[in-house]
């Protein structure tokens, strides 16, 4: 059974940091680009960042560029999202998902599959 489990969310003050992880079981990340998405209450799910199969190519939305860093460890079947300088507008449920191609762009939710259950990130002002 394929399972994706996100972890690392929590409550943090503005300016703080969190590191999200997404671990896959019953599945190999090797041939998939991986994306992180988020969904705030009442809003559509949006792409945050993605990383290519090799890890050599990354993409960030304008809203997180310079603050978030995506990385992957294929040996551990895990992808990470380091989030620094968090803002209240970063509050959302964060999800990881995969796409069966080398690069992750375009970072559109409809193109991705195998969604995890999400992890809540709350940033207080």
Image: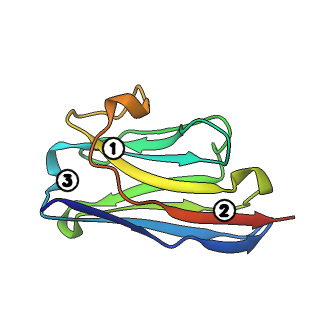
* Looking at the image, residue 20 lies above or below residue 116: below
Tag 1: Cα neighbours inside 10 Å, few (<14), some, or many (≥20)? few
* Looking at the image, residue 27 lies above or below residue 42: below
User: Nearer the viewer's eye, disc 1 or disc 2?
Assistant: 2
Residue that badge 2 annotates: 84
| Marks 3/1: CA–CA distance | 15 Å
Q: Which mark is residue 56?
A: 1
Disc with the residue nearer the chain's start (3 vs 2): 3
Q: Quick one: quadrant of the N terminus?
A: bottom left
Give the residue furthest to the top: 106
Residue that badge 3 annotates: 29
The residue at 29%/44% (across/down) is 98
In x, y percent, where is residue 120?
Answer: 58, 65
Location of residue 25 (image quadrant): bottom left
* Looking at the image, residue 62 lies above or below residue 19: above
Q: How many numbered tags mark residues here?
A: 3
């Amino acid at each position: 059974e394929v399972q994706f489990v996100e972890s690392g969310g929590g409550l943090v003050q503005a300016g703080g940091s969190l590191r999200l992880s997404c671990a896959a079981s019953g599945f190999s990340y090797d041939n998939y680009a991986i994306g992180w998405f988020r969904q705030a209450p009442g809003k559509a799910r949006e792409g945050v960042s993605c990383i290519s199969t090799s890890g050599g190519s990354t993409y960030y939305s304008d809203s997180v560029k310079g603050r978030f860093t995506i990385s992957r460890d294929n040996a551990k079947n895990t992808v990470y999202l380091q989030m620094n300088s968090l803002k209240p507008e970063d509050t959302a449920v964060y999800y990881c998902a995969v796409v069966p191609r080398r690069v992750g762009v375009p970072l559109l939710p409809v193109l991705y599959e195998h969604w995890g259950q999400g992890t809540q990130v709350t940033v207080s002002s």
